[in-house]
Image: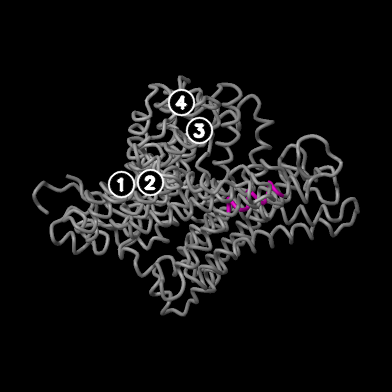
Amino acid sequence: MIRLEKRPTPSKAWTYATPVLAVALTMLAGGLMFALLGKNPFLAIKTIFYDPILGEFAFYYRGQLLVKAGPLILIAIGLAMGFKAGIWNIGAEGQYIMGAICGAAVGLAFYPAEHWYIFPLMVIAGALGGLLWAMIPAILKVKFHTNEILVSLLLVYVAEQLLAAMALGALRNPDATGFPGSRNLQQYPAASNPELWAGTGIHYGVVAALIAVIFAYILLSRHLTGFHIQLAGQSPKAARFGGVNPTMLVVFCMGLSGALAGLAGLFEVTGPAGQIAINFNSGYGFTAIIVAFLGRLHPIGILLAGLLMALTYIGGEAAQATLQIPAAAIQAFQGMLLFFLLGVDVLSNYKIKRVKEGVA
Amino acid sequence: MDLSSINWILLLASLMVASTPILLAAIGELVCERAGVLNLGVEGMMITGAICGFAISVETQSATLGFIAAALSGAALSMIFGFLTQYLLSNQVATGLALTLFGLGLSALIGQGYIGIKGLEIASLHIPLLSDIPVLGPILFRHDLMVYVSIAIVAATWATLKYTRAGLILRAVGENHDAAHALGYKVIRIRLMAIAFGGACAGLGGAYLSVVRVPQWTEGMTAGAGWIALALVVFASWKPWRILVGAYLFGGLSVLQLNLQAAGLKVPVEYLSMSPYLITILVLVIMSSGRSRAALNAPAELGRSFHASS
């Protein structure tokens, strides 16, 4: 019989080892899934994890890596702050959409003027859009004790409808005849977020993600607010005695994650996506939840986890093209990763002991 | 807009059909939460139930087998959650989210071959005499069997929780797992059963959507119904009968919204489609604030892991 014995403090070694173990287990289970789909599991895993970085066509994929990792990291950094404090903002997808809508609206309002200040204004609008959208669950939680998980999630569906309304209505390109959507911001230099160095995939959003990682690291390790966040998550009672204001903490964590998600949306709509359209959002807000956990809610970990998840996206696309592995399989694969991650976490918090039957 | 173009009897008649998916999912989640387990994976279990139910019903040409398959698939998926949260003591919020993300991917994967296929024709019951009552007949007594099964499940859940020993034990586990453990009840086993029941009900709810209501398979077709079901449990203050009231109230509003769209209300469709989610949020606010705070009725151990040696 196997018994679990709680460790006094989580094991350091396992804390680092569990994400790696989870990835390995996911590859095994994923390989099994691909085999069930009738594909060669080794080829599939190689196509997803190896080819985009070191394979024959890696020069094309490498740039894509940062394009996908940027928004994931940016959103996950914000979410991780809340998760650490026990505040569950799971509506980042909605905040991402709202950031894109608000930022794009500001840019389109200036069209076709060319001023240097248009893009900075859009960035501010994007962050504010996400922030205000996240303030809805935050304020409802603080004022009325509503559950922020449900409210923030339900607001994703509201934001998706709003996105459709904007793409077909207020922000629709008046000159376009084809598929409904806004003007393409990539073709409007004052409002575009171009690739900064050709072939690298680095745009302002990727830069912002790196800055966010650094700031989050400093905040968590050197700043009082960071300490309060960790305290509130580990021991809410101690936090209250220690003078942490729970209201402020909810507003801060929700606001920060909302603003970062909004920024991610803004950089996406002005860069890789180019326009507000019905199918603009692609689930980054949800995948970022996996990124945050895979990175163990630590800024550096999130940086690495974001790159790995981006790899599953582009590797998934490659596997779709060459092996006809459906996109849904990659989505299931990502979900599996989170399962394994949460499962193997038991190793860092508990010791596994074998005991003889009948002792208990 | 032409309000008279709305057939109010038809509207009320479609209310029960529209409410059944969330009613089933919510009653399952209620049992799960009364046992102290917060499973946020309802959406994932619903959508998996939707595709499994649809696929099996199309393959076997039997709606009954479809529903059985849906319940089994929902329960099977919930057991992943059960194993992780009960034996590996993982965080219930995060694991529930993982279940939803995984379920959405898995269902899309299974459903690839079923896009665009038409589902079965499900005949409505015709109960002699009752169905022929004017007005009330079409509203209450001319639906398919699952509508009445769902009501029966609510009634059975209510009776079990209130009057039986099993219900008492389940509630004890949800209110104070240490005390229940000290009395010799198998906390983890009881919780696993509650989780499986929740999964089966969510699967049935999803299948009702794909087999009866639509009847077709589209990716992501539950569109947040699982989350609304979770909110419904809060609305109901964890009481079975109130789930019934809440689900029908909610179903009525969403049917009304669809009818207003059809009647050509001068509001873009998107804003009307938002209304179910906004109303759910509003209801959550009302239920969570003030003197009637729903949280006071919540099971005391909701969301906490149980570890015997602690």
Q: Nearer the viewer, residue B102 or A166?
A: A166
Picture quadrant of residue A25: top left
Q: Residue at x 36, y 55 (%)?
A: B38
In three-dimensional space, the C-alpha distance between marks 4 and 1, rounded to whole angstroms, equals 38 Å
Disc 3 marks which amino acid?
Ala
In three-dimensional space, the C-alpha distance between marks 3 and 4, rounded to whole angstroms, equals 15 Å
Image quarter where the C terminus of chain B lies is: bottom left
Q: Residue at x 31, y 53 (%)?
A: B31
Closer to the chain start, of discs 1 and 2, is: 2
Crowding around mark 1 (Cα neighbors within 10 Å: few <14, some 14 to 19, many 20+) is some
Badge 4 element: helix
Give the numbered dot on residue B153.
Answer: 1
In three-dimensional space, the C-alpha distance between marks 1 and 2, rounded to whole angstroms, equals 8 Å
Crowding around mark 4 (Cα neighbors within 10 Å: few <14, some 14 to 19, many 20+) is many
Residue underneath mark 3: B108
Q: Are marks 4 and 1 on the same chain?
A: no
Percent x, y for residue A243? 46, 80
Disc 4 marks which amino acid?
Phe
Q: Residue at x 85, y 51 (%)?
A: A190
Disc 1 marks which amino acid?
Ile
> Start and end of the magenta stretch?
A156-165
Q: Nearer the viewer, residue A248 or B117?
A: B117
Q: As displayed, is residue B34 above or below residue B192?
A: below
Percent x, y for residue A192? 80, 48
Badge 2 element: helix
Give the numbered dot on residue B24.
Answer: 2
The nearer-to-camera label among 3 and 2 is 2
